[in-house]
Amino acid sequence: MTASSNTTSGESAASFALELQKISKSFGLVQANKDIDLRIEKGTIHGIIGENGAGKSTLMNILYGLHRADSGDMFIDGKPAKIKGSADALSLGIGMVHQHFMLIPRFTVLENVMLGSEGGALLGAGRVATAQRLQELGQTFDMVVDPDALVSDLNVGMRQRVEILKALKSGANILILDEPTGVLTPQEATQLFEILDKLRDNGVTVLLITHKLAEIMAITDNVSIMRRGEMVGHRKTSETNPQELAELMVGREVLLNVEKPEANPSDVALSVSGLGCYSSRGHKILDNLNFEVRAGEILGIAGVSGNGQTPLMEVLAGMRKPDEGQFEILGTTITADTHVTPSDMRANGIGHIPEDRHKHGLVLEFEAYENMVLGFHDTSVTGEKRLMDRKHMIAHCAERMEEYDIRPRAPHLPAKNFSGGNQQKIVVAREMYENPKLLIVGEPTRGVDVGAIEFIHKQLIALRDQGCAVVLVSVELDEIMGLSDRIMVMNKGEEVATISGADADAQKLGLMMAGISEGAGA
Amino acid sequence: MSNVKPLPRWADLLLLPLINLCAAFFICGIVVWMIGENPIEALSVMIKGAFYYPGSLGYTLNYTTNFMFTGLAVATAFHAGLFNIGGEGQAYVSSLGIVFVIAVFAPFLPALLVILLCIPAAAIMGGVWAFIPGYLQAKRGSHVVITTIMFNFLAFALMVWLLAGPLLERGQQSPQTPKIPDNAILPKMETALGWFGMDIASSPLNLSFIVALVASFIFWILIWKTRLGYQIRTVGKNQDAAHYAGINVSRIIIITMMISGAFAGLLAVNAVMGVQHRVVLNYTAGYGFTGIAVALMGRNHPIGIFFASLLFGALFQGGAELDFEFQSITRDMVLLIQGMIILFSGALAYMFSPSLSRVITGLSRKEASHD
């Protein structure tokens, strides 16, 4: 907003839209940010990359006034800035697009954008002004959105656009985007990048927070890397590469692509025919699915999240009954009339790594050793005695922690006190322990750091090579393409196409995820 | 530095509740002072009344027994994430189990067997009364808080009708059953200890206190040692994870409610077989409700529940003494103290936690620098 600042202060600092000096912030004993220095040049796209828990979100929340730094200074356009709340941030021209959208679905686009600038008790004037502003912004940045559409009718990409417009309307010239592509298809992500380009061309400074290396490489000018609350490096994007960034993030050498030998599929482990499911409201969420998975292969299921992957996994794991069709799983046929429980499925040799470890995979308040037997509490991992054998369970947990390098090695620590990656390793260790013949895996590396991703991917491939059939559901295309021997793409509960892993590329999968099946045969 | 360390375990479990308790007594002391009495004197009267005078400990422990049963009941449900407000009704209706066993077996069985049959009968009846709210919660989603409250009213109505009608003692004007036969009476503690040559003052305390201790032990085994307990706790902490783990959530909810009701039902063993020797109107006297505070204060652990019960028992007994000794203090003062204790150790349980933590951290730092 204050573009005139360039002329008033001729110092070199003025060429930075934002400068942070020695910002520190701790929560109790946890030092979330330590002496953070950051300089962001005007009119650039600056990436901030780091593993989960590296302190990226804390830093952005300080910038946006949601947290207050314990110490350190902040300069905007070279001038010292005190941000005590998001209202201060807004008035200084900082806007934020949150990972989870802050829109009211039952309001129209215009009503959502108008929030915060209603302009008096009656809405008339504010409405007209906002509509005009929306049109201007839409033209400047090529972001045309129907102002009268209900937000609930928009797709995710469009909703994000509304969020961006909302920030720009308030005069933001520094825009913070927190993990913006997490919910987008590859095509939508490309469109977002085009918008970001336009913003940059018009002098807006963009801060992009992400843990995806590919995005950093694709769109940013500069990148800062965070690890354990500290800035560990700043690079010009043109002068770095994904390998270097990954190593800076993790602090050691990592394999971005896990070595995968040729698959050796044998007997059919899972055969699905005509499977269908309805939601509690009567919508069809799975529609006439037919596929097979053989022992020794990984079937990847790609799709934008919410296109039937969740109910499919639940049905296969015995958590939900199919409404139509049937499937034969390790020799047991299951139809709508079969009474089956997740325990039956486990006893049958099925492992299930759920997509949401906090909701399903773990009891966060339970200690690690108690979580290590979740779902297996009736088996010998809890001991052979009539009562649960605590010593036996703790020893079992300690062994798994050693084997899967779960840190800290503390069977008594509540699950909630482990990092995301180590929590996931607890689930993986538990589900792989009984050597399942069929493993259902959902989002195995969501919110997991790069080091743990490598480990989990290796485990999945090793399990496959032992002759386990793996069904892998993931919204991360890199993961799907890196691990799967065959890929089934789902859209609206239906199979769009199934292609071999070798034939897949992001472009093709992206089209299929949008429901377009042309070129599937190629 | 404003770093706040989590409290060490001993401070969390012992020191903090003690501080909360002191705070509650302090506020009550101010009230006593304001109505013109000496708070120190009042406190000493209460303590003497609860523990010191001959027989007073027996009275206190008798109340403690009741609180333990209802406290365990609330805690059981709480471990499954359920709020059983129906302890009152469950404890009331459970006397019907005792009445039934006495009617059928007392005429020809010896005392030991009759008693050993009556105890589970009371528990089962309490469990049955809790089954319907449990079933409705599990299968129909009717909230257990609402249904257990409703079942309290149903229990009151049912018992009034039975005590004033079918079960009424012949020729009796007040609604109560006839006296139970001698072979269904639980021996008093003074009698039982007399068998071992010990001599204590006379009080209503009876062997149901032992039943309460056994029930506490069973509770501990059930919740932390059995697979059922593991399933109960899983359901309580995360129902989605329980479903994922193959635990039948509805079944666990129903079973937990029944076990909870069974603990509450044991209160009838004390009230009917130990103290009154008949079923009288309103013998539950609010124990079911106070059990909620007991469980809360006792952190749903049997040892905590024991001490919380002892505290509330002492308040009941010492409060009566207070009423007797002071002209201007009535029994209502006990309600005030109870209320303060519930406020400080329930609602404001962690109010002193940060400052206490700073003190402890400060002390340990000093120690470290001296070494």
Image (spheres, helix red, strand yellow):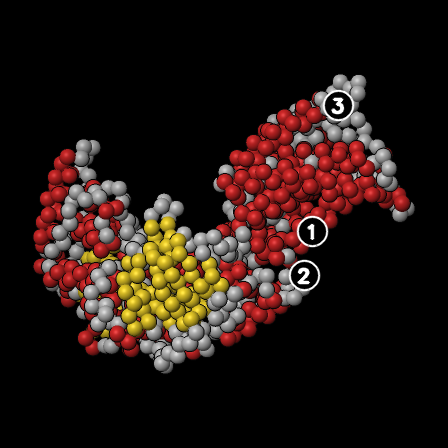
The residue positioned 17% from the left and 61% from the top of the image is A191
Which quadrant of the rendered structure holds the C terminus of chain A? Answer: bottom left
**Residue highlighted by disc 3:** B168
- Looking at the image, can residue B8 be seen? yes
Q: Nearer the viewer, mark 2 or mark 1?
A: 2
Of B196 and B263, nearer the camera is: B263
Which chain is home to disc 1? Answer: B
**Residue highlighted by disc 1:** B218
Which chain is home to disc 2? Answer: A
Of A106 and B286, nearer the camera is: A106
**Residue highlighted by disc 2:** A386
Give above or below for A168 relative to A448.
above
Give the amino acid at mark 1. Ile
Q: Secondary structure at mark 1?
A: helix
Q: On the same chain: label 2 and label 1? A: no
How far apart are the two marked residues, 3 and 1, measured between alpha carbons? 35 Å
Give the amino acid at mark 2. Arg
Which chain is home to disc 3? Answer: B
Q: Residue A354 sits in which quadrant?
A: bottom left
* Circles 2 and 1 in contact, beta carbons < 8 Å: no
Q: Secondary structure at mark 3?
A: loop
Q: Residue B314 sits in which quadrant?
A: top right
- Looking at the image, can residue A222 be seen? no
Give above or below for B60 relative to B1.
above
The residue positioned 63% from the left and 66% from the top of the image is A383
Relative image position of residue A411 (x, y in whole percent): 55, 66
How far apart are the two marked residues, 2 and 1, measured between alpha carbons? 15 Å
Q: On the same chain: label 2 and label 3? A: no
The residue positioned 61% from the left and 67% from the top of the image is A380
Relative image position of residue B132 (x, y in whole percent): 58, 38
